[in-house]
Amino acid sequence: MHLNPYGEYAVLMAASLADDWPEDRAGIEARTREFGMTMDFAASPDDHLRTRQVIDEWLRVVDAPEPGERARLLNELMARATAYPRLTDHGGEGWHLHYRDDANDSLPDVLRAVISVGTALHLTTRGIHRLGRCAAGNVEGDPCAAVVVDVTRNGRQRYCSVRCANRDAVRRHRARRVRPGGPRTH
């Protein structure tokens, strides 16, 4: 038996959906496959819209200003996906845990369960601060609003990419070199 805690991959999948929203249901399902989900989902005409609502609910957790608020919002999200954990061996994957009701296999409902439980596991095992927005976007005029899922060993990932980190470093360097009233002399 192996334990599939829906941790890191679920949070990275949610960030991927939030940062690059697919244009249709097929795109969402393809993205779930990219992140290792193998199950088939019952189709409904409103899956695209309802899944977007799940991601928007999750983004409220990402954007929560303090840990208590983040926990409250995440608890609400998990409560909407309430089901007791169960062992399953579907698709020959080996025994693992599901955190959702097997009777409800719609795309948005499964993703709500997987993403909310995965986020809770990520934040409780790695740290409640290890989810947020790219620090480059904190500077006025910088358009980056990408989600950062910190999976580093030291827990200090602040940027979504090397590009954003470099752009912010250049800004900080230039700000140090130029003081009010003109260029600094050496």
Image (tube, rainbow, N blue to C red):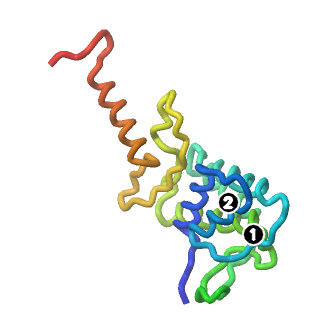
Q: In which quarter of the image is the N terminus?
A: bottom right
Would residue 101 be found to the left or right of residue 115 on screen? right
| Disc 1 element | loop
Residue at horizontal 46 percent and vertical 48 percent from the top: 160
Residue at horizontal 77 percent and vertical 73 percent from the top: 105
* Residue beneath disc 1: 82
Residue 88 seen in render: no
Residue at horizontal 72 percent and vertical 69 percent from the top: 110
Sequence-earlier tag: 1 or 2:
2
| Disc 2 element | helix
* Residue beneath disc 2: 27
Q: Which amino acid does label 1 sit on?
A: Thr
Q: Which amino acid does label 2 sit on?
A: Gly
Give the residue furthest to the right.
Answer: 45
Return the x and y of residue 112 as percentages of the image width and height. 70, 63
Q: In which quarter of the image is the C terminus?
A: top left
Return the x and y of residue 94 as percentages of the image width and height. 58, 88
Return the x and y of residue 51 as percentages of the image width and height. 74, 57
Callout 1: few (<14), some (14-19), or many (20+) C-alpha neighbours within 10 Å? some
Residue at horizontal 75 percent and vertical 63 percent from the top: 108
Would residue 148 be found to the left or right of residue 175 on screen? right
Give the residue furthest to the left.
Answer: 186
Would residue 122 be found to the left or right of residue 72 on screen? left
